[in-house]
Image: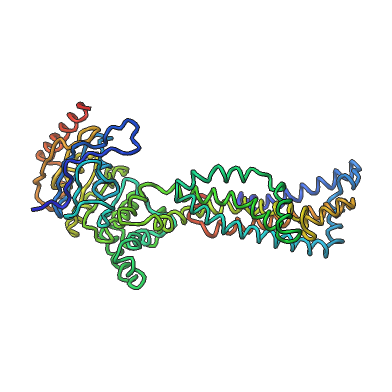
Amino acid sequence: MKPFVDIHDVTHVYARAEDGLPAVQNLNLKVHEGEFAAIVGPSGCGKSTLMKLATGLQFPVEGTVIVDGKQVGAPVKLAGMAFQNPTMLPWRTTLDNILLPLEIVEPHRSRLRRHKAEYVAKAESLLAQVGLKGQGHKFPWQLSGGMQQRASLCRALIHEPKLLMLDEPFGALDSFTREELWCVMRDLHAAQKVTIILVTHDLREAAFLADRIFCMSARPGRIVAEREVEFPRPRDLEITYTPEFSALVHELRGHIAQARQAA
Amino acid sequence: MKTKNKLALAPWVFTVGFFALWEILCHVLKISSFILPAPSTILWAVWEYRNQLTYHAMHTLWMTLAGFGLAVGFGLLLGMVLGSSRLINAGTYPLLVGFNSIPKVAVVPILVFWFGVGWVPPVMTAFLISFFPIVVNVATGIATVEPEMEDVLRALGASKRDIVFKVGVPRAMPYFFGSLKVAITLAYVGSVIGEQNASNVGIGNLLTRASAAFEVPLVWAALVVLAVLGVIMYAITAYAERSMTGWAQRSQMAA
């Protein structure tokens, strides 16, 4: 099977980097279509750079990035993104925030005005899936942090992206809300068949959600370990308390500790 | 009395108190009305010259609004350009700052060379003096779009223009309306300066003529009219700000 995202031997140096040190070096990573991949690593290891490379917001200095069979030379247009900060626009209602990508991406952009009702219905159903049924008319600042993050996931998914990039999306939430959102994410992935790349600091989060986990080294970032996660789906939160799960998290922790020491 | 009522009443109490104190001081210290007329004398003069004052005040109001309108249009446009292009921003900033630091009263003679005495110099002065804060504020609002938001949209294939219009401009609106409050007062100063130096009508011109003729009560009456007009225009812009950008003033709405 051909990988959906193929990052091959990529080295990237930001033009602004004062020390000229690469953010990532000889990075290799393959994610298959429909797969849920997680990337873990010490802070400052170039995880965000990887996100930018895969979505075409940055182009590698060396190496190639192939997404969906095409070499990336411009923003990929088929990606949805969510960040630690929900970045909702405060002057739009939650529903209008979710519809924002449709005002950008074709073919929705030219259809939006005439087929508004259809798109609104779709947004409402996404809201219901993340547990925000009927909250669309509220402004984002009337919602709690966890609810804003759910809405931000809806916005990332509204245009049915083939690739969903999540940059520590649950990092700022309390642990109960976080676990709730893990389940939301798990169900969305099962329902939408979208390829997901999740960047996270949280090893339990990676182990619970992902099919495949990549551990990155400290800057300049490389993949130091790749690990498939074999827990059967659908997964229940209970598995996070099993010895196998703890063993996996422990193993990942070992890789990260090594990566930190090497730095 | 509740705090809310007290707050609503406070501006009236303080204003009336201020004028009452002024009146009393004038009488007790027997200040000559040539130096400082009492409020009652000024009010009497306002009534006496009401026709003349209304005529000139309407003219000044027009000059101010015309100049202000130009400043809003031009300021929005230039602000959008400066906010969305770092190159143009860096390139033109010294020019803009240099231009802004010229006292506009010094520009009036040039305006007279160009356009002669009439309605153009006051409008132009009002415009030139008031567009700068609008430009700076709109540009700042647009230039400070969160990078994550920009990434979200760019990854979808959004053009620079999409980002400026969907996120930058709406985001800059609170800054824009904030700057309008500054700009309207400046435009007003500009039109009065213009009228004083290069017009045959308007409160500015009336002030020049009244002071040349030592008609002290008329000078003061004109000043009072200016102050009242200024407060009204400021209040209208402040109201527009509140009603257009309520989302940005959540902390006050909660109170």
| Residue located at (27% from left, 64% from top) | A125
- Tell which of A15 and B126 is nearer to you: A15
Report the number of discs. Answer: 0
In the rendered structure, the answer to whether residue A255 lies left or right of residue A48 reads left
Identify the residue at horizontal 34%, vertical 57% (top origin): B158
Quarter of the image where one finds residue A119:
bottom left
Q: Which residue is most to the bottom?
A: A114
How far across and down, in percent of the image, does residue B206 sit? Answer: 82, 57
In the rendered image, residue A108, in percent from the top left (x then y), is placed at 30, 66
Compared with A48, B50 (above or below) is below
Lateral position of residue A245 relative to residue A180, left or right: left
Quarter containing the C terminus of chain A: top left
Give A241 or B175, whichever is nearer the viewer: B175
Left or right of B90, for residue B188: right
Q: In this orientation, which residue lies closer to the viewer: A251 or A10?
A: A10
Q: Which residue is drawn at 10% across and 52% down?
A: A2
Please tell me whether residue A187 is drawn above or below residue A30 in the rendered image: below
